[in-house]
Image: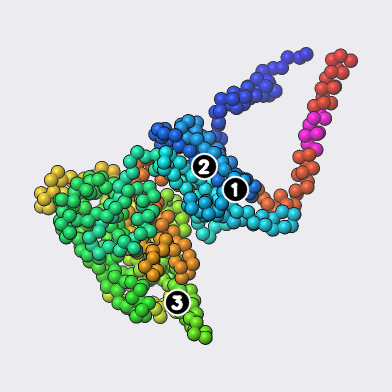
Amino acid sequence: MKKINAKSPLGIFLFAIIPLVIILAYSGIRLDLTKEKRYTLSDNTIKVLESVKKPLTVEVYLEGDFPASFKQLQSETKFMLEEFRKINPKIDFKFIDPIKTKMSQDTLMAMGMQPSILPDVKDGKISQITLFPYAVIKHGTDGVSIPLVVQQAGIDADEQLTRSIEGLEYNLVSNIKNIAADKKKKIGILVNHDELSPEEFQGFVQLALENYDAGPIIPKNQTELSLADVPLLKQMSALVIAKPRKAFTDNEKVILDQYIMNGGKTLWMIDAVNAEMDTLTRSKKVMPFPIDINMTDFFFNYGLRINPALVKDVKKFALLRLVTGEVSGNPQYTSLPWPYYPLGIAENNNPITKNINPVKFEFPTSIDTLGRKNIKTKVLFESSERTLLKQVPNYVDLKEIASVDSLGQMEKPSTPKIFAVALEGKFNSAYASRIERKSYPGFKTSSPENKMIVIADGDVGRNKVIKGKPLPLGVDLMTNEQFGNEQFLRNALDYLLDDSNLMELRNRNIEERLLDRYRITEEKSQWQWFNLLLPLAVIGLIGGLFFWLRKKKFG
């Protein structure tokens, strides 16, 4: 028989490609040939997985009979967890079918899982499939349930699944990092300046406690922050200041300045104008006025200025539900546009704001960025191009709801205004050349690499309270909407305290390569016959070729 030339296409296939495929199959090595490297774990993920010292199990409730799109999510999750196990054998996983194992919905919901109910059409009959697309991470006596499907309104099912797959690595590894950490980072919530009440801030505290130790910071002298509070502040990885309405003293500003200079992260939710919807609803008309918390020079040092003028967005706004009539003694409600409740909609590729529901702001003001050396300023949310500014003091009247586009007294059209920014870099002390530096032992003039988030709305972290009971953060019972405030603030904390740079994984994009469903329907039978007959034709051709070669050689 004629020898096969190793340099010929057939020789390369037989002597190079096939052995390589066999070696890769048995060795477990995989080559990621995708453009976006979707099957390659990041270096930061690998470091986190390698740091897990005790056995950790991931239980995935994605097993059973469900649509093909969820099969893809199941496949991607399984592949990801297999890669995790290769990096660290202490990480194991299993897939569970809650229907087959007869787990009750009450049990699953008690574990923090909410069902997804999908329509299923087979043979012209429509039925419903109940899924629990969650994973439960167990580490020792601790456990946490995490949703595998992105909770984002306004997108179709295909896009929702695509975004879920994009965020899969971050979703899993960030929770593995938090649950496997020997010690949780501490978050201090400043309580001394007429901030939000415990009931109004309960939603934020609950989300903070999911991954961190959070608690109040109350000045020891019951009056203002002082040097006596510094040891406690030094234990805090981050400090949250939510809607302060009492002015900070100069001594407190030095304490906060040095907290930042020593690497402390800060999350500011600031109201520059006093305007409350409860008062407006009762009186139909209020006069907002500026609030001076004595922090203008403090923020100016970081290249920011919070302006005392209300921002009205006549394009991106939430609805306000009001009584507009009465039938037989029953009030009739209508949802109407309210430009003083602008929506923050992510329009850039920032990991803090990506793939979350619109964030609801209530009577926000705006932030001017002035620029500072060594500080990077990233805009998180801003208003639309159809923005109006209302100078204060000035009246806000419920009647404005009838003509949101018209200009009122002391109002003017404006360019888009910034609601929230993130700052990164080495911050310089505002007191480096001032006499106040002598009052602080071990005064530092600059910080290491640090982060800060400033939001020009104190209510962004406030949950509603109905009859003394706090509602979940971001929930509006009147309009039955779930806003993205909780997701935004959770991401903000993770960004501030992310020392592994995992947040960058939220920016991963996967190019959609979808099949043409119209062609699939139209050409279904054609491709079925093709797939049936092609293997038979190939087998027949090979058989005929073998018979011809045999006859030629021995005939």
Question: Is residue 28 or residue 300 the one in the foreground?
Answer: 28
Q: The disc labelled 3 sits on which kind of residue?
A: Leu
Q: Looking at the image, is mark 1 or mark 2 earlier in the sequence?
A: 2
Q: The disc labelled 1 sits on which kind of residue?
A: Lys
Q: Position of residue 195 (x, y in %)?
A: 27, 62
263 on left or right of 440: right
Q: Is residue 171 visible?
A: yes
Quarter-of-image position of residue 170: top left
Instruction: Say the numbered circle drawn on residue 59.
Output: 2
Q: Which residue is located at x 35 percent, y 48 percent? A: 212
Q: Which residue is mark 1?
A: 102
Q: Is residue 307 visible?
A: no
Q: Position of residue 554 (x, y in %)?
A: 86, 14
Question: Is residue 521 or residue 151 the one in the foreground?
Answer: 151
Q: Is residue 233 above or below residue 323?
A: above
Tell me the SS state at disc 3: strand
Quarter-of-image position of residue 297: bottom left
Instruction: Say the numbered circle drawn on residue 322.
Output: 3
Tell me the SS state at disc 1: loop
498 on left or right of 221: right
Q: The disc labelled 2 sits on which kind of residue?
A: Glu
